[in-house]
Amino acid sequence: MASAAERLDEHQRRDVRNRWLLSAPALVIVFLAAIGPLFVMVAYSFMVKGDYGDVRFGEFSLDGWFSVLFQRDIFDDTLGLADAHLSILWRSIRLSLITTALTLAFGFPTAYFIATRPPRAREIWVFLITIPFWTNLLIRTFAMQEVVRNEGILNTLMIWSGLVDQPVQIMYTDAAILFGMVYVYLPLMVLPLYASMEKLDFSLIEAGYDLYATRRRVLWRIILPLVRPGVIAGSILVFIPSLGAYVIPRVLGGGKNMMLGNLIELQFGAGRNWPLGAAISITVMLIVMLALLFYVRNATRSGAQHG
Amino acid sequence: MAKRAKAFDLRQQPGFATMAMVTFFMLYLPMAALVVYAFNAGNSMAIWEGFSLRWFYSAASNERVQDAAMRSVIIATCAALIATIAATMAAIATTRTKPYRGLTFKYAFINQPLMVPEIVTAVALLIVFSRIKVWTGYSGLGFLIAAHSAFCIPFAYLPIRARLESMNLTLEQAAADLYATPWLAFRRITLPLLRPGIMAGFMLAFVVSLDDVVITEFVKSGGQDTLPTYMLGQLRRATTPEVNAIATVFLLFSVVLVTALFFVNRRKA
């Protein structure tokens, strides 16, 4: 006869086993069509590139990783830095950081505005943020094209107001990419910010004013520290897709202003260098992981402070 | 003293309301411009030549657009169905329990598609699927459905899990006390209570699949354009307001779906 404790233990073990079986379909699908391929890609980055794309299967080489940062001179075979790659890497990081800063600058007041409305009105304002959030990314990029193209809203407005007398070329520049990214990723900043501001304890703010703090001081010394987790979450949510942006620079940036996403595509298309493409992809993923690590560390630390 | 306290609004910050209004205006202005130009009578996107519905007719009678729209709906329906079923099972397996070994692992695994930039997943899938295509000779919609199912799972999972966490086990235990089999208790108790979460999950998964550009662009074989990849291809050429017309219909569809979702959620609350 098994004791009661043993039976309970057996029961629990069966429960856990059932729970694994139940979650198996989701885990298998995600493994086969998302995580597994990432491992295969790591393997591909260490293979010899095929002449017409793909790789020579099973032939080991470090050339893919090597060409992420370096290139051999065509004439004298000397080593040099791959300037094109480095400038694209730098542009991607720079544009992503500026995008994050700008979405924060617009998103913070917006989220605060929503969080300080009466509850019924709040729902409507949040709804107005979620509509663009769930609208097709391509359509929103395309909508931004209507603003920045030569005959677009921005140029029409600037000519009409007499600011300039010729249309300014914005389309196919870094500025156009920036406009597009800020526009497309803004909801990703507002939503987490709002989530943390909604829980804001206004008695703390009242205490601040009672102690003769100015509005600005209350903002910097009370509100900002309290909503820090939201600021970090929003920044991560904007930074990650910005760094991997592909559609926005392709549509608004034209052929010359590439970002990492387009550089990766190039290697799998006309470049016919799959190992290099795989190596760049993994580099992007590593940068993202670093950002996430930073997030986790900061989130737990600020949690400890207030908890 | 009381009068002064009333005039002083604790919550206000100078300039924030103005910034918020500017933000909302900026969010909707570009989309409004896109919709307006869909009704342009002229041939170019550049110059307004009067109101007309011709580009809507032209898009609706374009065979490639019909094809792409059909394909988009087929993929989104299959992927959302698969993802919702898998996510429902996974949600039941990961909620309403004491923490057990592997629980955090499951969370991380299921949400992984959200953590990696789409372009990275896209090329990884391109690598694997192109090899499978060569080995098996099969290049049908199965690949797109598999890829879409995977990235739809976290979107379907979140609302279902949230709903489950707000339900307690009392009713299921009562059913078990009355000799209901686990399956009967699930069908008669858990499932009806869970329905709003499942519906929300399905709709999110459907929209996410319908909207996908990047992964579809890399995984599709020749002639497998969905509506978004068709539009992306058109944008590279000299564009006519036909693209605006397609985008407008697409936009309208998204707005209707999100509004429906909004009301589903509100009824729940």
Image: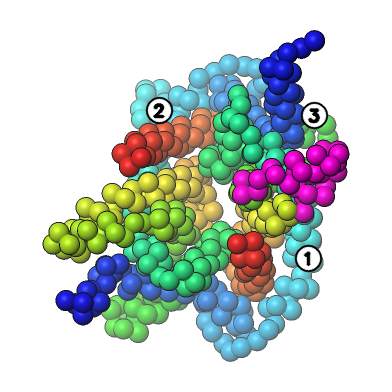
Of all chains, the one bearing label 3 is B
Identify the disc placed on residue B243.
none
Most extreme residue toward the left, as rendered? A212
Above or below residue A258? Residue A206 is below
Q: Nearer the viewer, mark 3 or mark 2?
A: 3
Residue annotated with mark 1: B66
Image check: B144 left or right of B238?
Answer: right
Q: What is the quadrant of residue B207 in the picture?
A: bottom right
Of all chains, the one bearing label 1 is B
Q: What is the quadrant of residue A41 in the picture?
A: top right
Q: Quadrant of the C terminus of chain B?
A: bottom right
**Which of marks 1 and 3 precedes in the sequence?**
1
Q: Which residues are magenta?
A: B165-192
Whether the magenta-drawn stretch holds residue B167 is answered as yes
Most extreme residue toward the bottom, as rendered? B50
Residue annotated with mark 2: A70
Instruction: State the SS at label 3.
Output: helix
In x, y percent, where is residue B190? 75, 47
Disc 2 marks a residue whose amino acid type is Phe
Of all chains, the one bearing label 2 is A
Most extreme residue toward the top, as rendered? A1
Q: Are marks 3 and 1 on the same chain?
A: yes
In x, y percent, where is residue A39? 60, 26
* Other residues around mark 1 within 10 Å, as few (<14) / some (14–19) / many (≥20): some
Above or below residue A238? Residue A107 is below
Disc 3 marks a residue whose amino acid type is Trp
In x, y percent, where is residue A28? 72, 32
Q: Residue at x 15, y 59 (%)?
A: A211
Q: Quadrant of the N terminus of chain B?
A: bottom left
Identify the disc placed on residue B135.
3
Q: Residue at x 67, y 21 (%)?
A: A57
